[in-house]
Image (spheres, rainbow, N blue to C red):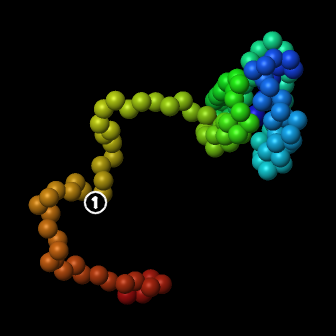
Amino acid sequence: KLTLSYCEHGGSSRYVREFISSGRIVDYARANPTVQVAVEVQNGRHPNVNAEYLTGWDKQVCVKNEPINRISNVIQMLNDSSGRKMNRIDGPVQTQTPSVQGIWTPFLDIRDKKFGMEIVQDGVN
């Protein structure tokens, strides 16, 4: 669900009101029928775009004094993301399941080796 909140009178909501009155929010809703779009008036508050995801996560982006193209980019960014929070990885990443191919080493020289190959079709050799 995507909720666009704005103030009817505040100067910081000027571009959001223009975005809504130009019909861009309706165009977005038509282009993305799987997204539930809502417009909410919150007088006395700065405008923001709030996205609620099916996974239970939510994200809120303030669009105070942002031009129309930035509002459009924020809405598209929220549509394209999964809603998960970004986590910084501070060290080397190690896996619990090592590669089936084995670990590569610079001493692995297989250029001149011949490997036997057999093509199997429909279970017949």
Residue corresponding to mark 1? 101
Residue 17, horizontal then vertical, whole percent: 83, 29
Q: Quadrant of residue 118?
A: bottom left
* Residue located at (33% from left, 46% from top): 97
Residue 108, horizontal then vertical, whole percent: 15, 63
Q: Is residue 51 above or below residue 101?
A: above
Please indicate, yes or no, whether residue 54 appears anywhere in the rendered image: no
Quadrant of the frame with the N terminus: top right
Q: Is residue 105 above or below residue 124?
A: above
* Residue located at (87% from left, 41% from top): 23
Foreground of the two, 96 or 16: 16
Mark 1 surroundings within 10 Å by alpha-carbon count, few (fewer than 14), some (14 through 19), many (20 or more): few
Label 1 sits on what residue type? Gln
Q: Quadrant of residue 77?
A: top right
Residue 51, horizontal then vertical, whole percent: 70, 31
Please indicate, yes or no, whether residue 121 appears anywhere in the rendered image: yes
* Residue located at (82% from left, 40% from top): 25
Foreground of the two, 68 or 116: 68
Foreground of the two, 114 or 1: 1
Residue 109, horizontal then vertical, whole percent: 14, 68
